[in-house]
Image (spheres, rainbow, N blue to C red):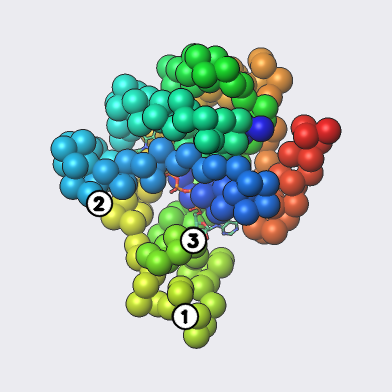
Amino acid sequence: MNIVIFGPPGAGKGTQSDFIVKNFNLYQLSTGELLRSEIRNKTNLGLKISSLMNSGHLVSDKVVSDLIEKFISNDEYKNRFIFDGYPRNISQANNLNFLLKKYDQKIHLVLKLSVSLDIIKKRITGRSVCSICGKIYNEFFNPAPLNAQCCASKFLQKRSDDTLDIAIKRYETYETKIAPVIDFYKQSNLLKVVNGEAPITEINAEISGLMETIKG
Ligand code: AP5
């Protein structure tokens, strides 16, 4: 099964993808994470995109498409994808369909996590990620366990684009591009809207139910 999960910054795409990976043996393809890895590794691409990402704008469609095709073309992941943060505009939605068709795959479910801007501000400014295991926390809603070994506070890191100003810009970028993507998936009857403001475990359960229905 291939799933698309989208929603504004801080909607919980990564949090829910973690859950799906663990419980349904899918592979999370996060375009944000792929791009951050280029920046961490100081590749030529990483050097070019770093200021763009820290201004809340999208990286070019071509760059992101080239990155994801490497995975979509790999048989190891065939029909096991969670596309986290891709597509973000209509050209990416068309491109994803094109690539999936090229490698004899399709999308089975599209999840849209809905969250208001007020909540997003706290989600983003309160977020930290464990640099050892990658687990996502939030100082307001979902704090790291006290006395944890792996996720101890010294290992928790903030993302450079997680300031309030950049979060608002990222939200605006999302809002200006996403409407045609929503229509696109509505027309193909794949779209399920999930209340992203519910507690994490409730959303886990709702997504599990949707996936079980599709697995039949
Ligand atoms: P990306 O890394 O994808 O960032 P984003 O879309 O802004 O989403 P986030 O990762 O910030 O949030 P999330 O929805 O995963 O939330 P999370 O689970 O962490 O992209 C970054 C940048 O890369 C983009 O701005 C762009 O420049 C570039 N880029 C990426 N993809 C691109 C593309 N396709 N094309 C072009 N450019 C691209 O949760 C957030 C916080 O909330 C956490 O602290 C978590 O603990 C907490 N939380 C989660 N769920 C809940 C809940 N239900 N209740 C309470 N707290 C919760």
Mark pair 2, 1: CA separation? 24 Å
Q: Earlier in the sequence, mark 2 or mark 1?
A: 2
Tag of residue 28: none
Image quadrant where one finds the N terminus:
top right
Q: Nearer the viewer, residue 117 or 93?
A: 93
- Residue 213 is drawn in which quadrant? top right
Q: Report helix, strand or loop for mark 1.
A: loop
Is residue 138 something that shows in the picture? Answer: yes
Instruction: State the residue in front, 85 or 140.
Output: 85
The residue at 48%/70% (across/down) is 139
Q: Secondary structure at mark 2?
A: helix
Q: Is the residue under label 1 in contact with that under label 2 (CB below 8 Å)? A: no
Using the numbered discs, state the Cα–Cα distance from disc 1 to disc 3 in whole angstroms. 15 Å
Q: Earlier in the sequence, mark 3 or mark 2?
A: 2
Which residue carries the number 2 mark?
Answer: 40
> Badge 2 local density, few (<14 within 10 Å), some, or many (20+)?
few
In the rendered structure, the answer to whether residue 186 lies left or right of residue 102 reads right
Q: Residue furthest front?
A: 75
- What residue sits right under mark 3 in the picture? 136
Observer able to see residue 122: no
Q: Which residue is mark 1?
A: 149
Give the vertical position of 55 relative to 183 (above or below): below
The alpha-carbon separation of the residues under discs 3 and 2 comes to 18 Å
The quarter in which the C terminus is drawn is top right
